[in-house]
Image (cartoon, rainbow, N blue to C red):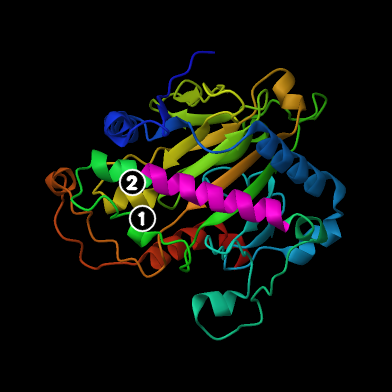
Amino acid sequence: MSNPLKVVDISQPTASISGPLLEAARQQGFLFVDGHDFSQEEVDALFALSKRFFTETPEDVKNQYAIKSNNIGYTHFTNEQLDPRKAWDFKEAFNFGNINFKTGTFNQDDAAFNGRARTPEDHENAVPEMFEAHRELISQTSRKLHATAMRILQVMSQGLEVEDPDFFTKKHRPDQASGCVFRMLRYPLIRSDAVDADSYDATIRAGAHTDYGSLTLLFQREGQQGLQLQTGDCEKDAQQGWTEVPFVGSQHKGLAPPLVVNFGDLLSYWTNGVLKSTLHRVKFSPGETRELDRYSIVFFVHPEHATELVPVPSKLVAEHSKGKPATTITAAEHLQERLRATYASEA
């Protein structure tokens, strides 16, 4: 399978990669990022832990950590509906949040982290026993993913010709409350003898959607593809309007495969639409991949909650201005609006 996405090596000098990164963000909203700081062994350990949790932990134990309005915890099958026009998404996930990327702590007291009074649904360092035993791995991974995201945002600042090269990173400080989430995902297999295994809703495992935040960073496994991005008119042709994201290897010996990176709604809003937030989905293809579980490791990047989403100070962004918004919203308000729509049935 050919690769339709740009591959940008962030270990190269900023001046040499800011143009290609901006071009990918404007044209497709997706790209591969190589030259990160993850070894193959690290990523293998993450996927092994994820598989153990989802396949060995009893359902009643998983449900003790059910996701709350703070977007932390376990989501069971058909808990999410990313595309409101389609069936509920048949997948399960665990979200780690309230992450302090300086200290590496996560899922700490929600009230303390956000500086507010406690409520009955606040988590108190609550993670399943299996994850408790691997806090160091989860902590280190989260911190490295945040650092990788900051490198991407620094390069993007130069691509957009923002005067302050740290404009974005100053609004994604590592020790401030934000909506950043580190997520493990499992899409269960579809048995070939299932009654409606070939139906549209059976093969769509995550409905068509755009992501909410600044960036999304994703590790996928070889032979477990399924991520597709919209490249055509899906209303006219539901099958031909999508392009599959392939698996590609790193150009650096010993490194894990390049991260799949896409730009979210918030960053698109923040840049007056200069950066593209692309519709995407997960679809199981006919053949062997339909009869395998699909696992992915995802990091959703969000600015600090209090960040006001006024246009990025860039000439390129100003040229795309559609006038001043009637009201200015914060990053926290933007995220909560999207979460309410995704988990509408849980209200």
Residue under pointer 1: 169
Most foreground residue, 255 or 243? 255
Number of marks? 2
Q: Is residue 151 magenta?
A: yes
The foreground one among 128 and 204 is 128
Q: Which residues are magenta?
A: 135-152
Front residue of 144/341: it is 144
- Disc 2 residue type (three-letter): Gln
Residue 210, how many percent across, how many down? Answer: 45, 44
Q: Position of residue 176 (x, y in %)?
A: 46, 68
Image: 127 above or below 40? below
The residue carrying pointer 2 sits among few (fewer than 14), some (14 to 19) or many (20 or more) residues within 10 Å by Cα, namely many
| Residue that appears at 16% across and 51% down | 322
Locate the N terminus by quadrant: top right
Label 1 CA crowd tier, 10 Å (few <14, some 14–19, many 20+): some
- In reply to whether residue 81 is colored magenta, the answer given is no
Q: CA distance from mark 2 to mark 1?
A: 7 Å
Q: Which residue is mark 2?
A: 154
Q: Amino acid at mark 1?
A: Thr
Residue 137 against residue 303 in the figure, above or below = above
